[in-house]
Image (cartoon, rainbow, N blue to C red):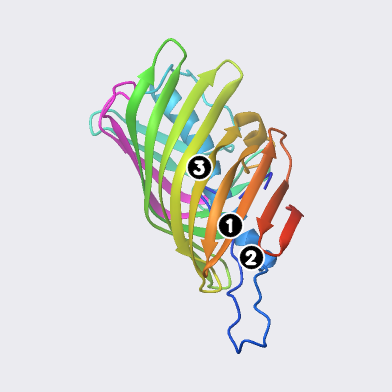
C-alpha cells in the first residue's frame, strides 16, 4: 500500500478465485482488487496497536528508556495502569477515545510481560478485551519475544506471533488472521523504525483463504504511522490466494498510499483511500 494495510503485519490482499470450466472457457486470473481494503484495515489495526504499545513500554521503564509522561498522541483521557508486581499493564480506552489523528479506540488492551524487555527471552503478551478501532472489533492474542538486542544502536529483534486473530466489521463480516514474524525495532531521537519479515495466513471477508510471505523486508516508520499512514513504506509480499499468485510492492520509502500489484494478468497500481 505503499501505504498499506498488515500487518502485520501482516498481510492479506484478497483475490478472486480462478474460474473453472471447459477448455474453451477463459480462466480468470485477475485479482479482485476491491478486497484490498480488507487487508489494509487488518494491518492498520495491528500497526496502530504497535505504535502506542511502544510508547507504553517506554513509559513503564521496561523498554529502552523511560518516558516520564505520556503525550496525548494515544488519545486524551486514556487510562494506563502499571502493575509491576504482577507484571501487567492495562490500557483502558473506555467507551470511546479519539486520538489527535482521528483514530477512535474503545475497550482494553492488556500487556502481560515476563521481565525487562531489554533481556533476550523476555516476552510481552497482548490480550484484547472488548477492543475496537474505528468500529472494527479486534480479537486474538499477540506475543512479542525478545530474541536479541543491540544496546549500542538501541535495536531489538522480536519474534511476533498472532494467534486467533480476527477483525469484525459492523455488518458482521470478518477476516481471520494468524502470523509468524521477525521484527527488527530500532529507536532513536526521531522515533522508531520497524523492519518486518515473516509469513501470514487467513480467510477474507468473502471466505477466500490465503497465504502470504515477505520476499523483501517491510519497512515501517513512526512518522508515517503518526501521520495516519499505516502501510509499509517499502517491501514486497508474495501472496497465494485461492490458488492465484500475486506480488505486492509497497515502493521505495515514501510515506504514501500507493502500492503495485503484479499478477498473471499484468501490473496494477492501487491508491488506498
Tell which residue pokes out farthest to the left in this image: 85
First-in-chain label (3 vs 1):
1
Q: Which of the 4 image quarters holds residue 122?
A: top left
First-in-chain label (2 vs 3):
2
Q: Residue at x 47, y 27 (%)?
A: 185
* Residue under pointer 1: 39
* Residue under pointer 2: 35
Region rendered in magenta? 106-131
Q: Is residue 125 magenta?
A: yes
**Frontmost residue, 160 versus 49:** 160
Q: Nearer the viewer, mark 2 or mark 3?
A: 2
Residue 18 x %, y %: 59, 76
- In the shown orientation, is residue 239 left or right of residue 260? left
Q: Is residue 113 above or below residue 260?
A: above
Q: Residue at x 42, y 28 (%)?
A: 57
* Residue under pointer 3: 49
Q: Is the C-beta separation of discs 2 and 1 under 8 Å? A: yes
- In the shown orientation, is residue 122 left or right of residue 212? left
Amino acid at each position: 500500500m505503499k501505504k498499506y494495510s498488515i500487518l502485520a503485519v501482516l498481510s492479506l490482499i484478497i483475490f478472486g478465485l480462478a474460474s473453472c470450466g471447459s477448455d474453451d472457457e477463459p480462466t480468470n486470473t485477475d485479482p479482485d482488487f476491491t478486497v484490498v481494503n480488507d487487508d489494509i484495515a487488518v494491518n492498520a489495526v495491528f500497526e496502530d496497536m504497535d505504535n502506542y504499545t511502544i510508547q507504553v513500554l517506554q513509559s513503564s521503564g521496561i523498554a529502552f528508556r523511560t518516558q516520564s509522561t505520556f503525550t496525548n498522541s494515544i488519545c486524551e483521557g486514556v487510562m494506563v495502569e502499571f502493575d509491576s508486581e504482577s507484571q501487567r499493564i492495562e490500557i483502558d480506552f473506555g467507551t470511546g477515545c479519539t486520538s489527535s489523528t482521528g483514530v477512535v479506540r474503545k475497550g482494553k488492551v492488556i500487556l502481560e510481560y515476563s521481565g525487562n524487555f531489554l533481556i533476550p527471552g523476555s516476552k510481552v503478551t497482548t490480550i484484547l478485551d472488548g477492543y475496537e478501532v474505528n468500529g472494527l472489533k479486534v480479537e486474538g492474542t499477540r506475543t512479542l519475544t525478545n530474541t536479541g538486542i543491540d544496546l549500542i544502536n538501541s535495536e531489538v529483534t522480536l519474534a511476533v506471533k498472532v494467534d486467533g486473530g480476527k477483525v469484525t466489521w459492523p455488518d458482521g463480516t470478518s477476516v481471520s488472521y494468524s502470523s509468524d514474524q521477525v521484527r527488527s525495532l530500532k529507536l532513536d531521537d526521531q522515533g522508531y523504525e520497524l523492519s518486518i519479515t515473516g509469513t501470514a495466513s487467513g480467510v477474507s471477508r468473502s471466505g477466500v483463504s490465503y497465504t502470504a510471505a515477505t520476499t523483501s523486508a517491510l519497512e515501517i516508520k513512526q512518522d508515517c504511522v503518526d501521520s495516519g499512514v499505516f502501510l509499509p513504506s517499502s517491501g514486497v509480499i508474495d501472496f497465494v490466494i485461492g490458488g492465484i499468485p500475486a506480488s505486492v510492492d509497497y515502493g521505495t520509502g515514501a510515506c504514501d498510499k500507493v502500492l503495485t500489484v503484479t499478477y498473471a494478468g499484468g501490473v496494477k497500481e492501487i491508491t488506498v483511500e
